[in-house]
Image: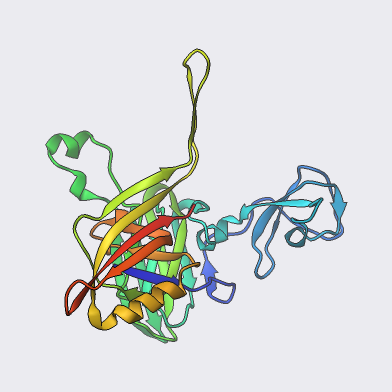
Amino acid sequence: MKFVRPIAITDSVLTSSTVAETEYTEWAAGTAYTVGTTVRRTVTGVHRCYTCLVANTGSAPESSTTGTSPKWQDIGPTNRWGMFDSQVGTATTVATSLTVVLDPGNIDSLGLLQLLGDSVHVSMTSGATTVYDQTFSLVYGAAIMDWFAYFFDPINKKTDLVATDLPPYASGVLTITISTASGNVSCGMCVVGQAFNLGNTQYGASIGIVDYSRKDIDTYGNPTITKRKFVKKLDAKVMVDSTIMDAAVIALSAWRSTPVLWIGADNLFTSLIIFGFYRDFSVEITYPTMTLCSLSVEGII
């Protein structure tokens, strides 16, 4: 079990992206906006889209979304920045291929969540030297159990991917490319940072979801289903080396109110990859050299 402490992806960290910010019209200070008009803001540190709630001129959207009579409603990040906010459900989506280049500083781990595509290529350079180069297939071949499934079942693909073996170069430049033979590629969240290795996840870990969809039944028994988002949840026991028990407790306590990327078993069981908070944890000093930690994690939308 590892958790990755994410760094903020800012304008200085995201040095390049093949996704242009072209949705809607850029907000302009001298334009009179009417109710229902949607604009984008691509200034440093913003990169979000807003819908006009009150007719106005000159009210910058990012500073006019609160108060008793907000003038603008924040409807989410631009497509370019959808994969870099703190929500898994806001994705960056383009056709065929997506490439981003990051200058994150000293990191050793990468997580990509809610992926759509055929493969992911990850490389890191330090100066003119390539220090990491790996291609990951997203095709989940383990689901093919027989020849009928091979020919007729739909192709299953992984939606989450982690790389926790990146070399920690302070000057490392990370390039990520998501590709597909046809159709769109998408990424709900990109997390980079340094991992803390708690220990070995024990068999018996359980994974599930919390579904926010609404199911209603009318007077005559007819169902109405409103499909909404869901989050994953994880309950696991982790065997921790007793020599790092205090450090583990301190690290967990320090990140108690900040969402992090939880990795239960690297890419072996990608269902155990969750971006979110731990709800609670407890430590049982089980053996002289090993300690058992019980951990409950719930994802965020």
Residue at x 67%, y 70% (from the top left corner): 44
Residue at x 78%, y 46% (from the top left corner): 53
Above or below: residue 286 compared with residue 115: below
Q: At which x and y percent is residue 110?
A: 38, 69
How was this image coloured?
rainbow
Residue nearest the viewer, comparing 62 with 172: 62
Tell me which corner region of the image, top left, top right, bottom left or bottom right, holds residue 198.
bottom left
Tell me which corner region of the image, top left, top right, bottom left or bottom right, holds residue 262.
bottom left
In the picture, measured across the screen, residue 63 lies left or right of residue 253, that is right
Residue at x 82%, y 50% (from the top left corner): 69
Residue at x 39%, y 80% (from the top left corner): 125
In the picture, measured across the screen, residue 194 lies left or right of residue 206, that is right
Q: At which x and y percent is residue 243?
A: 25, 83
In the picture, measured across the screen, residue 30 lies left or right of residue 23, that is right
* The N terminus sits in image quarter: bottom left
Above or below: residue 243 compared with residue 21: below
Q: At which x and y percent is residue 46?
A: 66, 65
Can residue 248 be seen from the camera position used here? yes
Q: Which residue lies furthest to the top in this view?
A: 220
**How many numbered marks appear?**
0
Residue nearest the viewer, comparing 212 with 175: 212
Can residue 131 be seen from the camera position used here? no
Residue nearest the viewer, comparing 44 with 88: 88
Q: Residue furthest left?
A: 146
Residue nearest the viewer, comparing 276 with 246: 246
Q: At which x and y percent is residue 261?
A: 40, 65
